[in-house]
Every structure is written in structure tokens, then in C-alpha cells.
Image: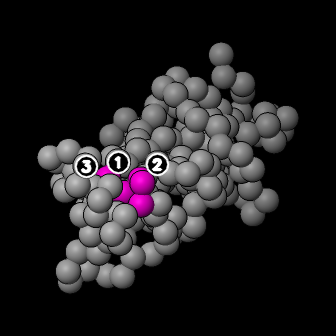
Amino acid sequence: MLVLALACSSAGADSGSLPGCATDVAPGTRAPAGTLDPGCACDPPAVEAGTGVLTFAPLEDGDDLAMVHGPQGGWHLVGAVRLENFRSVVDVSVQAWIGEVPITSELTYRNVLEPDGVCAGTLLDLYLYLDTHWLVGAGEPSGTPAELMACRTATLELCALDSDGRQGCDAVDVVVQPDRTDLVSGHVSACP
């Protein structure tokens, strides 16, 4: 605790504005979940949206993101996130939209970060289950996610929160690509 207080006292006048910087747990809050290197406690949290099942791949605006036609008949996107200066246990919320219309429900995952450096870690394989009912409710014809979402731009948003109140979000606009299975079966055509 002494090291944390010394590190923060030399970090500048607004270092106390970061939750958990001056003390590990503010009075009246829940116990901290996970660990945080004391040298990272006063640095601002950072969130980077990505994808990946086994390794993290950052996403940038305009990147392709393939939908997955799962074995149970549903479709999903795979998100991932890289976080800096968060505790090792975090809540990560994921959601996607086409325009202003949601195409997934908001899901929150609580998990332990896979370390990626001293002050960073990743969460991989975050499913965003695709649902067409909002698009149909907004006036689009009925259809499967492959039929209604392939080749369209969707906003993918990932937000993180730790038990000290550190939080941040990142959003990226991706082009939703059809699953290879749907292409081979002729269910949909390849994007131009």
C-alpha cells in the first residue's frame, strides 16, 4: 500500500481523479477483484477493440469481421479486447449495431485477463449473438442474420469496468462478412 501511495503522489495533480489511484478501495465500495500492479494504478485505463479466439487481433474502422454460423443454427460475431491499467478481473460488455439499430443484445462477461505485458491483458472469444428482430422491427424484411447483415457496416462496442471503477470503451465500424458455410451453401453471396 505504501508503494501505491508514493507512486500516486508523484504522478501529478489529477492522479487522484482516477478511481483506485489514491487508495485500493474507496470507502463503501466492494472488495477489489483481481490484481493491479501498483505502478499501473495511476495510469489512465485504455480499451482496444479486436477479435480473436486464440490470439488478439486489433480491429480498425473498415476492417472485415466474419460472422460465424454456429453448429446450433445461430449466427454470432467474435469480439476480443485488449485492456491497459485495469485490475486483472474485469466486466466487459459487448454490443453491435447497424446504424442506430442493435443487432445483438448487450452481453457482459466477467473474466480474468490473459496477461499481455505488466499493465495489460486480453479477453478473447467474446460472442456477440446476432438477432434480426430489431432490424425487422425497424422496417426491414424478415430474414436470417446472413441475409440481413452480410456486407453491411456494423459498429462493435466493447466497454470494460473493474472493481475500482476504472472504465473505458472502444468502438469500431466493421464490415460484416458472411460465414464460409453460408457462401458454400449458396445461402448468401460474397461481398463485392
Q: CA distance from mark 3 to mark 1?
A: 12 Å
Q: Residue at x 48, y 41 (%)?
A: 48
Mark 2: amino acid: Glu
Residue 115 visible in the snapshot? yes
- When the figure is inspected, residue 20 is found, relative to residue 64, above or below; the finding is below
Q: Quadrant of the C terminus?
A: top right
**Residue corresponding to mark 2:** 84
Pointer 3 with pointer 2, Cβ within 8 A: no
Query: Which of label 3 and label 2 is nearer to you?
Result: 3
Mark 1: amino acid: Asp
Mark 3: amino acid: Ser
How many other residues sit within 10 Å of disc 1, few (<14), some (14-19) or many (≥20)? Answer: some
- State the mark number for residue 66: none
Q: Residue at x 59, y 48 (%)?
A: 117
How many other residues sit within 10 Å of disc 2, few (<14), some (14-19) or many (≥20)? Answer: many
- Check disc 3 and report its element: helix, strand or loop: loop
The location of residue 114, given as percent across then percent down, is 63, 58
The location of residue 160, given as percent across then percent down, is 41, 56
Q: Quadrant of the N terminus?
A: bottom left
Query: Which of label 3 and label 1 is nearer to you?
Result: 3
**Residue corresponding to mark 1:** 43
Q: Give the main secondary structure, helix, strand or loop, of the magenta stretch.
A: helix
